[in-house]
Structure formats: C-alpha cells, structure tokens
Amino acid sequence: MSSVTTTKRPDRARTPRPAPRRRPRGPDLGAWFLVLPALLPILVLSVGPLLYGIALAFTDAQSGRTQATRWVGTLNFQDLLHDTLFWESFRIGAVWAVGVTVPQFLLALGLALLLDQNLRFRWLARALAIVPWAMPEVVVGIMWRLVYNPDAGILNETLRSLGLGEGHDWLSGLATALPAVIVVGVWAGMPQTTVALLAGLQNTPRELHEAAALDGAGAWRRFRAVTWPALRPVALAITALNLIWNFNSFALVYVLTNGGPGGRTRLPMLFAYEEAFRYGQFGYAAAMGCVMVAAVSVLIALSLVRRLKGDQDR
Amino acid sequence: MSALRTSGPARAGQYLALLAYLAFLALPFLWLVSTAFKPAPELASLHPTWIPKDPTLDNFRQAFDEQPLLRAAANSLLAAVSAALIAVLVATPLAYVTARHRGRLAGAATGWVVISQAFPFVLVIVPLFLVLKNLHLINSVAGLVLVYVVWSLPFALWMLMGYVRAVPAELEEAAAVDGAGRIRTLVSVTAPLLVPGVVATALFAFVTAWNEFFFALVLLKTPEKQTLPVVLTHFLGAEGVADLGPLAAAAFLATLPSLVVFGLLQRRITGGMLAGAVKS
C-alpha cells in the first residue's frame, strides 16, 4: 500500500527547496483565468447534467407534459426492479460487454505482439490495423450489414462456395443475431486496444528479454516472466475501459439490428433511449441510467481492488 | 539481438498470423468499397463477386439523389470543425495549468477524465436534452457543438497534458531568468513547441465529432439540421438488394474524411500517442 501512496504524491512536494522559486506552488489568479474557459462548459454541460440526471430519476418527468413534475421518491426504482424486460436487456448488455471485451483483448494482444516484432510490412500492418478506429460507427454497422446480407452478402457467398451450406440470415436469426453483432463489436474496438497494448509493449525492458532468452527461456516463459508483468497495468486499464465502453455502446447495434430480432440484441442503452425518446419517460430512463452507472461503478471498484491486491502480491 | 532471432518456421507462422489479422480487419471494408462500385444487376446476382465486373458510379449519383448528403456533410463539417477548434482552445490552457501545477487541481482534472469515461451517455442525455431545450439549442448545430466540445474535452485534456509535460519546464524558467514576463514566455517559448500536439489533438477531436452518432440522433430533429451519420441511417430500413449500392456509396464517402485524418495521425497513434498517458 505504501508504494501506492508515494507514487501518487511526488517527493519533491515535501522536500524543501534550496532556493525560493519564481513559479507559485498552486494555481494563482492567472492560472484560474486559464482554467475557466474549460471549467465553465464542463460544469454546465457535464457535471450539471449528471447531477440533474440523478435527481430526475426520483421524479415522474415525462416529455411534453403540461403538469408540473413531481418527486416520486424511489418509485421509478421499485418499478425497475420488477421490469423483467429491463433486466433481460441488462443481461444481454452484460453478455455483449464480456463477449466483446474478452476476444477483443486476446486478439489485440496477439496483434500487438506481432506488430512489436521486426516483421516486414509492419508499417503497412500498423496503418491498416487502425482503419476500424477511424470509421464512423454508423458506417461500421452499414458495412457489416452488407457482409451479413443473406443474399448479396459476402459471408453467405463464401460459405456457399466452400460448400458449407446455404448460409443464414445472420442478423435476423434469433440464435445468430447476438453472436453476429458481438463479432462486429470485436472488430470495431480492436484498434484502440491494440494501440494501447503496443504502447505498453514498448515500455517492456528489452535487455531483460535478451537475458531471459540467453538463459534458455522459451517464448512462452519470456512472455510470462518479462512481458506480462510490464504489460499488466496497461492491460488492466484498457480492459476496464473496454468493458465500460462496450456496456454503454449504442450506435453499432442501433444500425445493425436496432435491438431485434425480438429484443435479442436490445442493449440497455437502446432500451433507455427508447424509453426516453420514443415513450418520453424521462424519469424512468434516468433511473435506468443510474442503475447502469451503479453497475459500471461496481465494475471499476472491483478492478481497482484487484489491481491493489496484485500490487501487494508483488 | 542474436538471442532473440526467431526460427524460420516460427517466422512463417508469424507472417501467416499477421495475414489472417489483416484479412479480418481489411476484408469487410473492401466489401463495402466493392459494393459501392457495383451496378444494380450485379448486386442482385446470386453469386456476388469481390471485384465488380462492370464498375459504375451510378450508386454515388443515386445516393445524392435519394438523401441530402451534401447538406448533411456541410452540417457535419461545421459541427466537427467548430467543436475541434473550441475544444483545443479551451483545453490547452487547462492542460497547461494542470500539467505544470501538480496539486489538487491536477488531481481533480485527471479524476474527471477518468469518471467521464465511465459516464453512461444515457444518464447525461436526458438532462442534457432538457438543459439545451431551455437554452433553445435543440435542433441546432450550435447546441451539438457545445455537447461535442464537452464530450471531447477529457481525451483532449489527456493528450494535451502529455504534450505539455514533454516541454521541459527548464526552458520556461530560462526565459523567465532572461527577463521574459509570464505571457511572453508562454507565447514565444511554450506555444510554438506545443503546436504539433495541439494540431494532433484538434484532428482527433475532429474525427470524434465527425463520426459521432448518438447525440446527433437525439438532438437534431429536422432533416435540414442533421449530420451525415444520422442521414446515413435514413438509407436503412426495409432496403431491397438494389438499394445496397447507394447505401454503400454514401457510407464510403462519409468515411473518407476520417480516413484521411487518421492517415495524417497514423504515426502519432501507433508510435505511442498513448505512451505518455500510460507512463504517468
């Protein structure tokens, strides 16, 4: 634990300086002047709405209603507790988030390790590997709809030409829809993860690698003993972020299936969006948002606890 | 390095794996391009091919006829450029102060960066919608720009703080010793060194805003105001096979600006744009 606190608070703040410094310690008036232009929009459009949103969850706010909005206490949450559709959507969201994040991490780790090697055409691979990152999510969704198209899609055509059956209507099939959108999620999020892991790999000590190789350690042992310990903090951070991002994802599935067929791919975000902007139930949708934030916070807390434990083990 | 030389078969395996990765990442995009240039009869054919036999630009013409793509692109451009400019304009001073003064403010700033990543948009979007409605900024690009600025601030701040830290504080101190005032130091010593980082951050914010869909969907109601991603979804629905061509053509065009910008940023992105963030 002590190591954690010392890294957070640099020593130089405590040690007395030999000579008086020109630069002030904390932000002075001039500094505040520099900070204000960013602080104002943040407070008005980010912190403010967040608090407002939490407050809304305890009201019966609806869109286009003439009566005044009233406080209803925890009524929205009580309703939510019995809303089986929401919990089903929540379950789908969890399956989606884990189903995307885990393969995303494993595939990205493989790609990052490859790109860290001294391979030919590495520059080309690095350039191509970030293309999905550059594409608008809506275009990614449209693109995969073209790939999955039952008649004109390349996936079914490839299956047919390989003699693997007549293919499926992937995005409309009750059984195939969720796996099909998960594949798209993995594809779309791989570049960010790869880039983060690649940056982490570049921090691993190369000399240690060579020393381990000289001692006769195989590739797997070198990975376990040298690469992974250096990469672990980055891997944990990006995985936690990916879980959050994926759980909150919206555009991809909106374009691919719009939650269908029969709600099989209705992620919590799609559910809350419909509740708020199709049915106008602002208060109820805000309560859903609160539950989602709570779930995500628990996730972050768990990952932090794991990380602290890992630090102690070392 | 000799100890790390990879054996022949292992190297071949690595190239094969790399090839598989590139196929997975690139083929869907190639299919989009291929579909965009295919004439209608070929799209309806039972056995679609990778390379159009008779490439055509008809799909592009039809796409522009069916949907107001030019106006949508203009809206997107206006929103993305303004958002990127304003974002770096307000984020650079904040990044400078937080990077130089380690203290409560820096802690609060990084804390906010982390927390904002965990925001479910859903909890923010309803109140944001109500706030903007009260300000009469619903269904206006100006309102969208405001949202994009706030939304891209955390990452812009993150990137810029890394760039500020890369400028040695000793340089500023030297300028101060030479008698330069605080503003003079900032303008003639720090700012020039920050320009590349600020440009990269602005480009990144541009792509983020250009690609954004959710806020635009909620906040822009009339077709005249809508941005490109929202207009693209109007092609969807009960599309017949013949409509796939224009859909692909429009989607391909909407991607080009982002691809160009990412091409410009490519070296920064894979060369460790995140490295600074990772180390700190």
Image (spheres, helix red, strand yellow):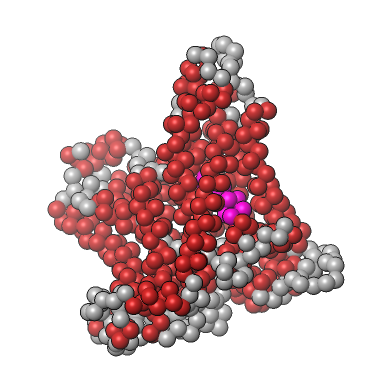
Q: Between B82 and A199, which is closer to the camera in this rendering? A: B82
Q: Between B182 and A313, which is closer to the camera in this rendering? A: B182
Q: Answer with left or right where residue A31 lies relative to residue B53.
A: right
Residue A313 seen from this side: no
Vertical comparison of B266 with A269: above or below: above
- Our reading of the magenta stretch's main secondary structure is helix
Q: So how many labels did they put on this image?
A: 0
Q: Which residues fall within the magenta stretch?
A: B145-156
Vertical comparison of A163 with A57: above or below: below
- Residue at point 61% right, 75% down? A88
- Image location (x, y in percent) of residue B82: 54, 51
- Residue at point 80% right, 65% down? A59
Q: Between A202 and B74, which is closer to the camera in this rendering? A: B74
Q: Answer with left or right where residue B209 lies relative to residue B24.
A: right
Q: Answer with left or right where residue B279 lies relative to residue A293.
A: left
Residue A235 seen from this side: yes
Residue most toward the left? B8
Residue most toward the top? A19
> Residue A245 lies in magenta, yes or no?
no
> Residue B147 lies in magenta, yes or no?
yes
Q: Answer with left or right where residue A246 lies relative to residue A120.
A: right
Vertical comparison of B266 with B15: above or below: above
- Residue at point 56% right, 11% down? A18
- Image location (x, y in percent) of residue A7: 53, 32
For residue A61, what is the image quadrant?
bottom right
- Image location (x, y in percent) of residue A200: 39, 44
- Residue at point 38% right, 53% down? B262
- Image location (x, y in percent) of residue B176: 52, 17
Where, quadrant-wise, is the N terminus of chain A in this rendering?
top right
